[in-house]
């Protein structure tokens, strides 16, 4: 596996000239020529990269997700992520742009912390961002402004101007992702249906007893998406996080058992994955403004 700690190392691997700035670089993707005979390349990089790419004949694994470049355009990769490229034969020449940002460039700026709040750096790679021609032009213009700025004489304003352009690009990306969630309702609602089916099956069977209450990570892994992606999607579709969906399903099952069975509150808590019935009673009251016993009494 290749490890790229610096932008210079990555430039060298791609047969590019040395970066003009050690911590930020805008690369013409048509000039990239990976210096390896391997058909399958695995690497990790200690910097952010934002790729605006076309005609890339490769399949990519990012974390546990597989992504075909024909299915998307704009991708976001965070530091210390593992990428695996499988190069495919093609007569088309790749094109586009690649923005590389070393975390040190963000040091001592608000974006140093804020960049971690942009959830698309944690998205499954198969949820790349689709852009219209107008949106693509907007993004390319920002990338070229960044390039122009670091190519100019560096002065005390340079970093702030580049940071402002980078924030603009990330905010546009966030807007476009929200639009993508809304315009791809069929796929998105399919995830919601799968979530409901999974939670029903989990709490109806033995899994809750054996494994406890499912975590957000476990649910996301089961649905084959990242936790951040799932929560973002659910908030757009339902206004609720994954954790809220888990709790709502849990309360729904609890109400069902309280109203239709003779199981004790402790037994119901156990079947739903709680180690302690007090924790179950506390959550139930928090969600319904009633204790489990009071809810059951209302049916008698």
Image (spheres, rainbow, N blue to C red):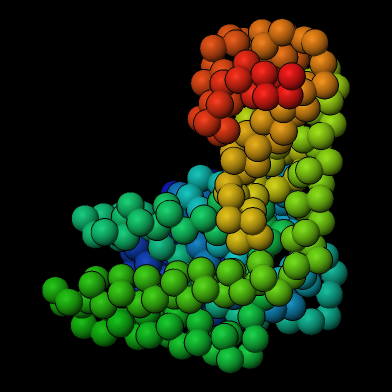
Left or right of residue 239, residue 206 in this image: right
Residue 270 x, y percent position in the rendering: 70, 11
* Whether residue 59 is visible: no
* Whether residue 294 is visible: yes
Residue lying at 65% horizontally and 86% vertically, measured from the top left: 132
Q: Nearer the viewer, residue 66 or 90?
A: 66
Instruction: Give residue 72's quadrant in the image.
Output: bottom right
Quarter of the picture holding the N terminus: top right
62, above or below 163, in the image? above
Quarter of the picture holding the C terminus: top right
Residue lying at 51% horizontally and 45% vertically, measured from the top left: 80
Residue lying at 70% horizontally and 48% vertically, measured from the top left: 225
Residue lying at 84% horizontally and 41% vertically, measured from the top left: 197
Residue 266 x, y percent position in the rendering: 66, 8
**View extreme (front): residue:** 300
Residue 42 x, y percent position in the rendering: 66, 48
């Amino acid at each position: 596996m290749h490890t790229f700690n610096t932008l210079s190392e990555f430039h060298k691997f791609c047969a590019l000239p040395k970066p003009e700035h050690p911590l930020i670089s805008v690369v013409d993707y048509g000039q990239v020529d990976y210096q390896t005979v391997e058909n399958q390349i695995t690497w990790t990089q200690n910097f952010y990269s934002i790729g605006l790419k076309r005609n890339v004949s490769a399949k990519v694994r990012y974390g546990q997700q597989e992504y075909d470049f024909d299915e998307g355009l704009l991708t976001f990769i965070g530091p210390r992520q593992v990428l695996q490229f499988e190069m495919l034969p093609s007569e088309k020449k790749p094109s586009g742009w690649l923005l590389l940002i070393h975390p040190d460039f963000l040091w001592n700026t608000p974006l140093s912390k804020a960049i971690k709040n942009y959830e698309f750096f944690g998205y499954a790679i198969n949820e790349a961002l689709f852009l219209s021609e107008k949106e693509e032009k907007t993004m390319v213009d920002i990338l070229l402004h960044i390039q122009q700025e670091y190519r100019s004489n560096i002065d005390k304003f340079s970093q702030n101007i580049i940071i402002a352009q980078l924030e603009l690009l990330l905010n546009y990306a966030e807007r476009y992702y929200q639009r993508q969630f809304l315009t791809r309702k069929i796929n998105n609602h399919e995830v919601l249906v799968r979530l409901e089916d999974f939670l029903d099956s989990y709490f109806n069977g033995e899994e809750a007893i054996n494994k406890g209450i499912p975590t957000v990570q476990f649910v996301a892994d089961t649905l084959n998406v990242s936790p951040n992606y799932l929560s973002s999607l659910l908030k757009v579709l339902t206004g609720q996080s994954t954790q809220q969906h888990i709790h709502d399903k849990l309360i729904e099952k609890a109400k069902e058992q309280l109203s239709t069975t003779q199981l004790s509150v402790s037994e119901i808590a156990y079947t739903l994955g709680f180690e302690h019935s007090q924790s179950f009673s506390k959550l139930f009251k928090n969600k319904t403004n009633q204790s489990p016993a009071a809810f059951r009494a209302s049916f008698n």
